[in-house]
Amino acid sequence: MPFQTPLPPDYRDLSDQTIADRIAAHKARFGKRLVILGHHYQQDDVIRFADFTGDSLKLSLLAAQQRDAEYVMFCGVHFMAESADILTDDSVTVILPDLSAGCSMADMAAIDQLETAWEFLTEATAVKIVPITYVNSAADIKAFCGRHDGACCTSSNARLVLEWALERGEKVMFLPDQHLGRNTAYAMGFPLESMVLYDPNELDGGLTDAAVDDARFILWKGHCSVHALFTKQQCDEIRAADPDCTILVHPEVTWDVVQAADLSGSTEYIIKTVTEAPAGANFAIGTEVHLVNRLAAQFAGVKKVRSLAGIQCLCTTMYRIDPQHLLWTLDNLAEGRPVNVIRVDPETAHEAQVALDRMLELRASIPLAAK
C-alpha cells in the first residue's frame, strides 16, 4: 500500500465549519469538472460532500458517465480508485484523499502468490480452471483474470458470473474472499464438499493434487475483516430477544451466518430491501456500521434498523478518509498540483478492463439468498 505523507499540522486545527466552507468553495469553483464520490461505508462527515454515493462498482461506473469531469475524488479505498481509473477516460484524473486507505481483503491476494497458485493448480488437474476475482481486489489481480479467460464479479452478480465461468470450464478459482465464493456456490446448489480452500501461505496452498482434481471450486483464503466480525451466535441472540426481527446480512459474512439469516445480498440489495420494506419493518443488519447507522437515521420512527452485532463493525481503512484529507487534496488541486493521483499502467489497465467488461455484461442484480 502506498505511503501517505502526514497532513500539514494546520489542517488538524481547522474547525469543522471552516473545512466545510472551503470544500464547498472548491466544489463551486470546479463545477462539473470535479466529481466527489462517497462509498456507502464512508463516515457521514465525508458523505455530506459527495456528489454521488454507492458501492465501489456503482461509483466507478458513475465516474465513467460524467462527461464533463476532469477530476474524480474517490472517497473510498485504493482498489476502488484503481477501478475508477480503469473505467474512465485517460483525460480524467482520479484522486484518493488518503493513500493509506486500503482494503485488508484485497491485500490478502498478491499477484506473485496468485501466479504461484496458478502454476500449482493447473499442473494438479487436466481440466480447465476459470479464475474469478471479486471486484474488491487489486488491478493486477483483475488483469490476471482477464488474460486467463476469467472475469471479475460483484456481490450482486457473483452467482451469474460463477454460472458463466462453469459454462467455460470445469472448475472455478475464486478470490480473494472465500466467504462470498462459498456462500454463492452453496446457494447455487453445490455442497460444501465440492469446495476446497487454497491458503497462499502454505506450500501448494495446503492442498493435494487429488483435492484439487476432486473440487469444483477452489476458494482463496481471504476475507473481509469487517464482515468476519458477525457470528451465528449474534443471530441466535437476536432470534431469542426479538423473534419478529428480519436478519439481513452481506454475503461476505461466514457461511453459518448466512444460513442463520433471513436474507443475504449486496450493499445495494440491503439498502433496497430496507427502503422498500413497509412501515414498522424491523431489521438487524450484518454489514459495515456507518451504512447501518445511516439507514437507521433515515428511517427513524418509521422502521427499526440496527446492527446485528453489539460491537462497532466499521471499515477502519475507509475511515482514514476524512474531511481534512479531502480538503488537503482539493487545496492542492486548486493550486495546480494534484496529489494522490491513482494511475494504473496501460497494460494492466487493459487486461483488467477485459475482466471488468465481462462482469459488466452480467450485471443483473439478484439477492444471493432469500429464504
Image (cartoon, rainbow, N blue to C red):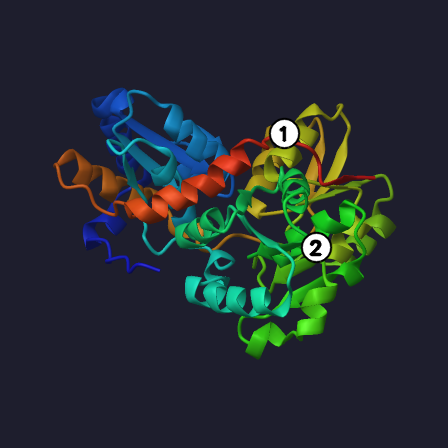
* Residue farthest toward the front in the current orientation of the protein: 126
On screen, residue 230 above or below 342: below
On screen, residue 185 above or below 1: above
- Give residue 282's position: percent from left, percent from top: 76, 35
Q: Residue at x 85, y 39 (%)?
A: 244
| Residue 18 in the figure: left or right of residue 113 | left
* Quadrant in which residue 30 is drawn: top left
Location of the N terminus (image quadrant): bottom left
Location of the C terminus (image quadrant): top right
Q: Foreground residue, 204 or 242?
A: 204
Residue 27 seen in the figure: yes
Query: What mark, if any, has residue 168 been given in the picture?
Result: none
Q: Type of residue at label 1?
A: Ala
- Give residue 370's position: percent from left, percent from top: 79, 37
Query: What mark, if any, has residue 182 been given in the picture?
Result: 2
| Residue 58 in the figure: left or right of residue 280 | left
- Give residue 171's position: percent from left, percent from top: 66, 55
Q: Type of residue at label 2?
A: Arg
| Residue 124 in the figure: left or right of residue 328 | right
Q: Residues within 10 Å of mark 2 (few under 14, many from 20)?
A: many
- Give residue 290's position: percent from left, percent from top: 54, 43
Task: Report the Cα–Cα distance between label 1 and label 2.
Answer: 20 Å
Q: Secondary structure at mark 2?
A: helix
Q: Residue at x 57, y 41 (%)?
A: 154
Q: Residues within 10 Å of mark 1 (few under 14, many from 20)?
A: few
On screen, residue 371 above or below 10: above
Q: Secondary structure at mark 1?
A: loop
Tally the numbered discs.
2
Q: Earlier in the sequence, mark 1 or mark 2?
A: 2
Q: Foreground residue, 2 or 288?
A: 2
**Residue marked by disc 1:** 364
